[in-house]
Image (spheres, rainbow, N blue to C red):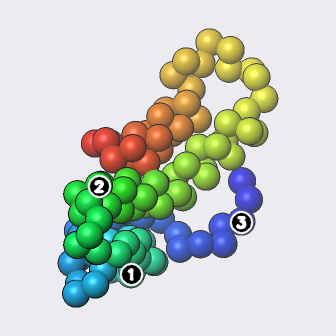
Amino acid sequence: MSERNWAAGLWKQGEVEHKQNYAQIPIYGAGGMECVCFVVGTTNPMLDWYAGARDLKANAHVIAAAPELFEALEAACEWDGQDMEGVDAVWLDRARAALAKAKGEQV
C-alpha cells in the first residue's frame, strides 16, 4: 500500500448547513472531530434549490468515501489473481462497501 497524503481514517459527512447565500456540508475525519473539507453549493432562489441540494449531498457522499474508494481500488490493482474463487475476496468486499458509501447507501 502506498503512503497516504490525506487525513487518516474513515471520513464521514455532516449535515447540510444553510448559510445566507450558500449551503455547505462538512466532511469529518476519523473520530468526527476534525473537519477535513466542506462541500459548498450556492443557493440561488432563481434555481431549483432541491436539485442543487441533491447534487450537493451526492458530491458529499463521494468525497466522504474517497479514502475508502482509494484503498479498495489500490487493493484491486495489487490483486495477483490467486484468489480466483474469491467472489468474497477482501478487496471485493472493501470495493463494494466503498461504492455503497459513495452512493449514499447505508454501509
Picture layout, residue 93 above or below residue 82: below
Provide residue 44's location: percent of width, then percent of height: 29, 74
The label shown at residue 51 is 2
Which badge, 2 or 1, is on the more N-terminal residue?
A: 1
> What's the amino acid at mark 1?
Glu
Provide residue 27's location: percent of width, then percent of height: 38, 71
Residue matched to label 1? 34
The label shown at residue 3 is 3
Residue at image location 47% in from the left, 61% down from the top: 63
Provide residue 95's location: percent of width, then percent of height: 53, 38
Please identify the quarter of the rendering in which residue 17 is found: bottom left
C-alpha distance separating marks 3 and 2:
37 Å
Label 1: state its secondary structure.
Answer: loop
> What's the amino acid at mark 3?
Glu
Which quarter shows the C terminus? top left
Picture layout, residue 29 above or below residue 107: below
Outermost residue toward the right? 80
Eye-nearest disc, 2 or 1: 2
C-alpha distance separating marks 3 and 1:
20 Å
Provide residue 97's location: percent of width, then percent of height: 43, 39
